[in-house]
Image: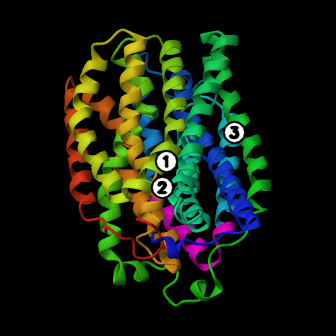
Amino acid sequence: MPANDQPHYSAEEKRKRIFAIVSASSGNLVEWFDFYVYSFASIYFASQFFPSGNSTAEFLKSAAVFAVGFLMRPIGGWMFGRIADRVGRKKSMVVSVLMMCAGSLAIAVLPTYATIGVAAPILLLVIRMFQGLSVGGEYGTTATYMSEVALRGQRGFFSSFQYVTLIGGQLLAVLTVVILEQFLTEADLKAWGWRIPFVVGAIAALVSLVLRRTLHETIKAEDTNKKEAGTLAGIFKHHRAAFLTVLGYTAGGSLIFYTFTTYMQKYLVNTAGMPAKTASVVMTGALFLYMCMQPLFGMLADRIGRRTSMMLFGALGALATYPILEILRGNHSSYIAFALITVALAIVSLYTSISGLVKAEMFPPEVRALGVGLSYAIANAIFGGSAEFVGLSLKNIGHENWFFIYVTIMMAIAFLVSLRLPKTPSYLHTDH
């Protein structure tokens, strides 16, 4: 951004914008804690809802339910994106966090297979579909809001806090499980201890509600009143290319993100033969560093440009994924596993630190939340939410290395699509 085009923010304006970032991202942390705690706790409750005597089969079934939750994301992305573009970002974020709260509380008190039989996994599936709706709207609205309130010239840095809190939600989820593992036996965790994280998530959601009610609205009335505001016609008539571009790089980004976060814990246990407690500790440390990386990579993108950062992500991801997963498969050292996963997550940070911002910069205000949320939700549902299921399925038939190839191909596609990103964004005034 040219020096004479730099905005001059008063100290009060800076304070308000930073507080808005903190408030929005804090609610984001709770949403993702509630959603991800399912994956980390499933090591203990899978046998309670899908008893079979075979750990891979039980993990596979719980992963399938996790994936179904993702399939609801496009509907949530459309529903909450429409609300955010036609009514306001604030109302959309408040409703989504209340829905997640209700879902977590329902899982916390859900009877198991031993109590109500086949109704238990069916009800679990329904609840996860409900939560999928909520989180489907969370990403697009939060990404849109944070991109609109972030300080110009530092949008990469401030927008990175969406993933700081998203990863923070994952980190707190796995950390909660680690703490419970220190005080409860494995038998207790499988019997009732797995319910505790869901209770914690439901209570935390009520706190986030208070924070989100303090937010000020960022979309103008003139934009919400436009005929095509929050409509699919408004996107596909004028912004089809942008929508498809976001779909393209989000597919690879979502897949590699879930490969090295939620699926990685099961991979370390089920493939590398690492004890569950050790795997949890490794992932806690790796996720903590990953969270801390986001602002740094956001600042890097402010200097080198979003497009360059995205191209590096695609190229490095395509080159490094297969060897990292292959080495992890035959590795028995927790230290080596930690180092390799950290390297992989550093590569992913080139994408996650600015992903919401890059998407938001491609759509005008009246369809921004819908464009960001729906494109992200569709790619996430197909590629991100299925990562665990595909990985476990290929392992189950004896071809786990095919999963490595699959992730590598998707990263190569992400690189090619990133070449289509504009050097200068059209709809948000930025320095790149």
Q: Nearer the viewer, residue 236 or 54?
A: 236
C-alpha span from label 1 to label 3: 17 Å
Residue 12 appears at what percent x and percent y? Answer: 77, 65
Q: Are marks 2 and 1 in contact (CB under 8 Å)?
A: yes
Q: Do the residues labelled 3 and 2 touch (CB within 8 Å)?
A: no
Asked whether residue 333 appears in the rendered view, the answer is yes
**Range drawn in magenta:** 73-91
Q: In terms of sequence position, does the residue under pointer 3 or pointer 2 come before the other?
A: 2
| Residue ID at (40%, 36%) | 346
- Above or below, 16 relative to 277: below
Element on which disc 3 rests: helix
Q: Mark 2 points at which residue?
A: 72
Q: Give the image quarter of residue 80.
A: bottom right
Mark in front: 3 vs 2: 3
Residue 248 appears at what percent x and percent y? Answer: 29, 58
Q: Give the image quarter of residue 152.
A: bottom right
| Circle 1 Cα neighbour tier, 10 Å, few/some/many (<14 / 14–19 / ≥20) | many
| Residue ID at (39%, 71%) | 425
Asked whether residue 396 appears in the rendered view, the answer is no
Residue 161 appears at what percent x and percent y? Answer: 57, 49
Q: Name the residue under label 1.
A: 69
- Mark number for residue 201? 3
* 50 sits left or right of 110 in the view: left
Could you tell me what secondary structure mostly forms the magenta stretch? helix
